[in-house]
Image: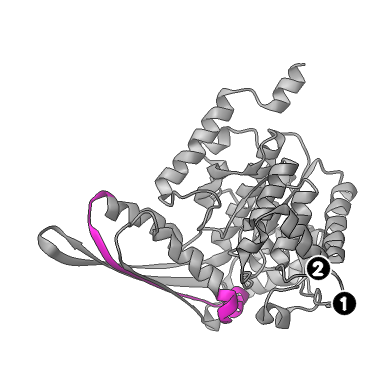
Amino acid sequence: MSASIGVWLVGARGNVATTAMIGARAIAHGATDTTGMVTERAPCANLDLPEVDSLVFGGHDVQDGSVVETAERLAERNGIPDRATLDAVRDDLAVIDERIETGTARNCGQAVEELADGGTDESLSLRAIVGDIQDDYERFREDNDLDRVVVINVASSEPLPADPEKYDSIEAIERALDEDEPLPASSLYAYAALAGGHPFVNFTPNAANALGGLRELADREGVPHMGKDGKTGETLMKSTLAPMFAGRNLRVRSWEGHNILGNKDGEVLEDDANKAGKLASKGGVLDGILDEDLHNRVRIDYTPALGDWKTAWDDIRFRGFLDTDMKLQFTWEGSDSALAAPLVLDLARLLAFADEQGESGLQPQLASFFKAPLGVDEHGLSKQFGMLEEYVEVHVAQPTAAGMEDDD
């Protein structure tokens, strides 16, 4: 794909966004490889995707500071990136930081508002906020001569709307904007993107494009979008192991998951209102795979000493032949941002491709990237991978829209 692609990250100075940008620029400089990127192995590597080193980054954030400062903290506290990699991309990060604008923290909950340095002006109407966001998207596109802009939400968790069904139509969304109802910030970013024709990804458990009215808007405007909540660690394991138990007819009686993490996301998740959406997406992955009644509980606790690392410990009790009670326990330890960042780059490339093909609405082939994939009831990881493989096979077998135009 020769088109120039912009990636606009909501939460651009956060750990995940910064790690994604470090990775993309490190790949461009030959300072790292593409391990962890789904789009760099078969079958996705057979698609005509934008090159990683061609992606142009910008974004919104509500905290002061810079991407370079975030990268320095990550290197100092977590050793990721290492110093050589950081030095290779430092100048690139400084340039990107000049493209980061102040976003909004409206209706993000007290935990986020207390951390925010900007974006909390209550005198602004929702219409004014959306207008400012749309202006930022458009300025980014024009200033960098971009063919398209993919907007990806990697901001902190926010409380879910009390009555999301209230916003099941475009008319309800428009009324909420006009009357300054408590639409969360993630949905304002999503509305601004979809109304402006920009592909949108929600990598968080936030409402964003999950609201029915915004899905309707995407369909009307012909814009591809997907979410929600990136699947990177414990839930990735659940979506792999649960089908194993189901396939062998082993009866899972209880599944306890205890997660501890130490970054800013962990701090935000100390607030019960902000935590609710994350718990729902992490726990819901067992639904539809293990259809029997079982005790299913997930805990998330903030442990500052872990920095950007996270640990999940799961205890699974199951029953087999002759009523034999057995157990499986596992521990998952990983760098939160290093697991998420390559998926952010994958999604930017795949959504840009879908947009070029004229595809619109939800993109079910991307289900494997999410804990709670919108519009997809299948949670088994291998079957989700199969959906992506089938999508690639169709597009590799047929000429692309761009290729047909070139032939003409």
Specify whether residue 81 is in view: no
Residue at 59% over, 78% down: 273
Which mark identifies residue 123? 1
Residue at 61% over, 61% down: 165
How crowded pointer 1 is (Cα within 10 Å; few <14, some 14-19, many 20+) is rated as few
**What is the residue that sits farthest to the top in this orientation?**
408
How crowded pointer 2 is (Cα within 10 Å; few <14, some 14-19, many 20+) is rated as few
Question: Could you tell me residue 136's position as x and y percent?
Answer: 85, 58
Residue nearest the observer in this picture, 35 or 276: 276
Indicate the amino acid at tag 1: Ser
Question: Could you tell me residue 75's position as x and y percent?
Answer: 63, 70
What range is drawn magenta here? 247-275
Q: Earlier in the sequence, mark 2 or mark 1?
A: 1
Question: Could you tell me residue 393's position as x and y percent?
Answer: 52, 30
Question: Could you tell me residue 282's position as x and y percent?
Answer: 47, 65
Based on the displayed image, in which of its 4 quarters is residue 264 positioned?
A: bottom right
For the C terminus, the quadrant is: top right
Residue at 43% over, 59% down: 285
User: In the rendered image of this protein, does residue 219 appear above or below residue 156?
Assistant: above
Which residue is identified by label 2?
179
How far apart marks 2 and 1 lie (CA) works out to 13 Å
Specify whether residue 68 is in view: yes
